[in-house]
């Protein structure tokens, strides 16, 4: 293993895996913190996905350190703390506390941070995070139900979460390339800074940042900054050229979409899907019971499975989300109800023969993967930037075992026609082939 990563949610982990596969690294995603005696996958990179983004800080730190310990014993040479490209967190954490704990455990004293992913419209300029052409706090993220982002200045945001100091490697240094970035990072570390936000507005910047951090023990950020890491290992003679990193076994069977994200991108994808696919929307206001919500959705799906992809959604616009949270006792209780319902629906769909499934939303993906008993995913080819198909061997649902193809989509990712495109990719000339 060359790279060991800890990701703070499941779709973010898949996003990073996709980036590494694109760079020619055979990559496996582990679901949840591995047990000490869990076997090490035959892979160049392993990404441990922990549902820690909105967890209590102490638990997030504890699980991240357990994952780090396993990755260190597995022989990883470099470590990556993956979080969302919109820096989802609160003044209490969890990005700062987890990064502090990893820095202390590794004894490296310093970590850079770069959530930029220009392909998906995330850029950092003079320390400020933009989503498309809007500042983070004007992008819709200021209304996120769990991690409302009301400040685009990442130096300031991260400073609230750590007792260390935070510096900036700004655009002028980044534009000069890898050597200038390396010098700026070294200078900040020598000044006693513990963290550095690094600007990036193009893919070339991300590659240069990755090259500059070739000898850093720890990096933090979105998947974009990992763009330059495979090249580092290849130049060091540790990673051979490979054209089969994305190969997956073929899995046939009915198809489905489960959508729990309330992001603008996912809402647009659902709007497009309604004109092409059968769509069922959960109504927790009238049925505030997870088991009954699932039973209603599965009753609707019976008779439709296998004809076209069935789409079952808990996604809703901000006003409906607010009303649901108010009725059900707050964001945590509303979120837990819908996650439980979607997990039950996923198990019911698999028991009815569904074998290829798109899941939209990090929390929903975590709940679904956990209920299905998915422990590891082999990463395949991208559907859209940051969202690949993955292969899960031996998932379980209602006592049955099945091999699945899963696409775990971050709510903010994917083109408007993503749900249709995902399944067209499986049926067309790009059908995923290969052996585990």
Image (tube, rainbow, N blue to C red):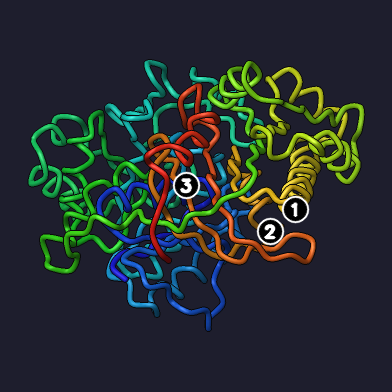
Badge 3 density bin: few <14, some 14–19, many ≥20, Cα 10 Å: many
Cα separation, mark 2 vs mark 3, equals 17 Å
When asked about the image quadrant of residue 222, the answer is top left
Q: Which mark is residue 389?
A: 3
Left/right of residue 250 with respect to residue 176 in the rendered view: right
Say what secondary structure mark 2 lies in. Answer: loop
Say what secondary structure mark 1 lies in. Answer: helix
- Residue 180: where, in percent of width, then height? 9, 42
- The residue wearing badge 2 is 372
Cα separation, mark 1 vs mark 3, equals 19 Å
Of the 4 image quadrants, the one containing the N terminus is bottom left
Residue found at x 76% / y 24% = 322
**Sequence order check: which comes first, mark 2 or mark 1?**
1
Q: Is the Cβ of the residue at disc 2 closer than 8 Å to that at disc 1?
A: yes
**Sequence order check: which comes first, mark 1 or mark 3?**
1
Residue found at x 61% / y 22% = 273
- Residue 342: where, in percent of width, then height? 74, 43
Closer to the camera, 71 or 388?
388
- Relative to residue 265, is residue 310 depicted above or below? below
- Relative to residue 82, is residue 295 depicted above or below? above
Q: Is the Cβ of the residue at disc 1 closer than 8 Å to that at disc 3?
A: no
Cα separation, mark 2 vs mark 1, equals 6 Å
Q: Is the Cβ of the residue at disc 2 closer than 8 Å to that at disc 3?
A: no
Q: Which mark is residue 347?
A: 1
Left/right of residue 58 with respect to residue 40 in the rendered view: right
């Amino acid at each position: 293993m060359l790279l060991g990563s800890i990701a703070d949610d499941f779709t973010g982990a898949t996003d990073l895996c996709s980036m590494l596969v694109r760079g020619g690294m055979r990559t496996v995603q582990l679901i949840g913190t591995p047990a000490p005696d869990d076997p090490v996958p035959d892979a160049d990179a392993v990404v441990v996905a922990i549902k820690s983004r909105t967890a209590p800080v102490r638990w997030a730190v504890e699980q991240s350190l357990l994952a780090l310990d396993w990755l260190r014993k597995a022989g990883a040479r470099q470590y990556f703390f993956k979080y969302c490209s919109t820096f989802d967190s609160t003044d209490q954490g969890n990005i700062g506390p987890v990064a502090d704990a990893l820095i202390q455990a590794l004894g490296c004293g310093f970590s850079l941070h770069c959530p930029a992913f220009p392909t998906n419209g995330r850029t950092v300029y003079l320390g400020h995070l933009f989503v498309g052409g809007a500042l983070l706090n004007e992008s819709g993220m200021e209304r996120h139900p769990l991690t409302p982002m009301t400040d685009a200045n990442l130096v300031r945001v991260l400073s609230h979460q750590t007792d260390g100091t935070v510096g900036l490697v700004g655009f002028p240094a980044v534009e000069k390339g890898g050597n200038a970035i390396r010098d700026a990072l070294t200078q900040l570390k020598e000044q006693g800074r513990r963290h550095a936000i690094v600007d990036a507005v193009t893919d070339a910047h991300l590659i240069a940042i990755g090259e500059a951090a070739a000898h850093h023990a720890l990096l933090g950020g979105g998947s974009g900054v990992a763009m330059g890491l495979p090249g580092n290992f290849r130049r060091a003679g540790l990673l051979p050229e490979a054209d089969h990193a994305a190969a997956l076994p073929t899995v046939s069977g009915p198809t489905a979409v489960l959508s729990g994200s309330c992001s603008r991108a996912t809402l647009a994808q659902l709007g497009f899907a309604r004109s092409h696919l059968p769509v069922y929307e959960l109504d927790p206001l009238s049925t505030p019971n997870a088991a009954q919500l699932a039973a209603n959705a599965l009753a609707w799906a019976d008779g439709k499975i296998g004809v076209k992809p069935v789409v079952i959604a808990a996604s809703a616009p901000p006003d409906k989300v607010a009303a649901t949270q108010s009725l059900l006792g707050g964001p945590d209780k509303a979120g837990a109800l819908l996650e439980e319902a979607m997990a039950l629906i996923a198990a019911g769909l698999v028991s009815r023969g569904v074998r290829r499934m798109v899941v939209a939303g990090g929390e929903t993906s975590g709940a679904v993967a956990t209920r299905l008993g998915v422990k590891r995913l082999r990463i395949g080819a991208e559907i859209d930037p940051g969202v690949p198909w993955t292969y899960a061997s031996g998932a379980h649902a209602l006592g049955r075992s099945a091999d699945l193809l899963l696409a775990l989509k971050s709510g903010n990712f994917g083109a408007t026609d993503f749900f249709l495109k995902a399944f067209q990719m499986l049926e067309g000339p790009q059908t995923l082939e290969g052996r585990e």
